[in-house]
Image (tube, grey):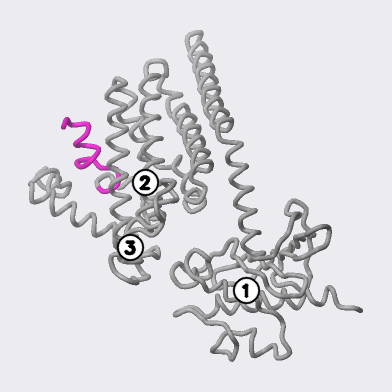
Amino acid sequence: MNTVWRDGLWHNNPGIVQLLGLCPLLAVTNTAVNALGLAVATLFVLTASNTIVSITRRALQPEIRIPAYVLVIAALVTATELAFHAYAPTLHARLGIFLPLIVTNCAIVARAEAFASRQPVGRAFADGLAHGLGFGWVLVIVGALRELVGHGTLFRDLGTLIPGAGNGGITVVDGGLLLALLPPGAFFALAAVLVARNIIASRQGQDNPELAREQG
Amino acid sequence: MGADRGGVMSGTLKLGLFAAIAATIVAGGWRLTGERIAANTHAARLAQFESVLGATVFDTLDYDAPTIVEPPHRLPGDAPARIFEAFANGARVARVFEVQAAGYGGPIVLLVGIDAAFVVTGVRVVSHTETPGLGTHIERERSDWITSFDGRSLGPDDGSVWALKRDGGAFDAFTGATITPRAVVEAVHETLLYAQAMEAPP
């Protein structure tokens, strides 16, 4: 696995290392399927915007780069939202404002500006996929944690994303703790994932931001 | 100076080009999905009306042209209420009232189906902002509670039916939520009273 993939999925993960895009990360992760829906949408937008930004990188002078990115990202998000509205209407209704709000996810403009605008198309595409998947797995893990504690199920309402799949999900325990589904539950679940991530990172002696700063 | 102006011009043109590309992406997306979205919206609305009307057989429903009742009215809620009429062979067989109950987290928009004999054919929640996990049991997907209105009508002894069990009525409350079901019961009751009063001889 080369550095592009390692960075996106782990070392420089947008969700748990850069802590970007926390608004959707906290807001729509009340079930694993909702989280997965937003993850798919973000993955598509991030990969497509990285690719377009990289293709046009030589043509744009620095003064108009950011407005051009905003235009491209807004158009991609609108098209994605239309696709969800047409092919997954129930999920579209459930994600509500957070689908159009992908446009404000700073992880996307950050990758465009920091990476895709100075890299060849192939690498920019891979970087978009890696960071999209990196953000996505964090969303799904947080969503699954909250759903498991809150409802006692996993992947309920999968039919809203994949037509034909059942809506029952896997029932692990009966009933659940309401707090996990309310906004505070999002913070607890994210904190749990962050703790796990930091423990693993420090065991491996890698890229602990605090440690790196202390060692200067 | 000349070089500066050239830079501004080319930047403007390029941004214009980007705007055109962005517009093309959006327009293309709309062309590909527009029909399907309209069909989805239509089907979802029709399915909702069908579930509210229960077993009532109807051939036409004026869901594009409801009667709008402006406030102040005696229906629940302060917003304009809408009344949809369902017909079979030219005779009105049922009405669907879109009204608002005052929930715990804000208005609960309800569709209440009432047939010609003033029997409730079904109730569904269109939108609400109740507490997830507590008040959300009013949703059909989450619980059967909302179907406990089916077949109810105004009786001679109103108070003993149209209230929560803890208030001496016939409807269950949910664990941890009383305000939400109470609001829905009251709203359906008021709608039924309104429907009957509309028809009553002066």
Q: Is residue B181 above or below residue A192?
A: below
Mark 3, residue position: A153
Mark 2, residue position: A21
Look at the numbered disc 2 and give the secondary structure of its residue.
loop
Question: Is residue A13 in the magenta section?
Answer: yes
Q: Is residue B33 above or below residue A39?
A: above
Q: Position of residue A139 (x, y in %)?
A: 32, 50
Magenta-highlighted residues: A1-16
As shown in the figure, which amino acid type bears the numbered disc 1?
Asp
Q: Is residue B30 left or right of residue A163?
A: right
| Chain under numbered label 3 | A
Mark 1, residue position: B150
| Chain under numbered label 1 | B
Number of on-image labels? 3
> Which image quadrant is residue B27 in?
top right
As shown in the figure, which amino acid type bears the numbered disc 3?
Thr
- Are circles 2 and 3 on residues that touch, CB within 8 Å? no
Q: Is residue A100 left or right of residue A53?
A: right
Question: Is residue A130 in the magenta section?
Answer: no
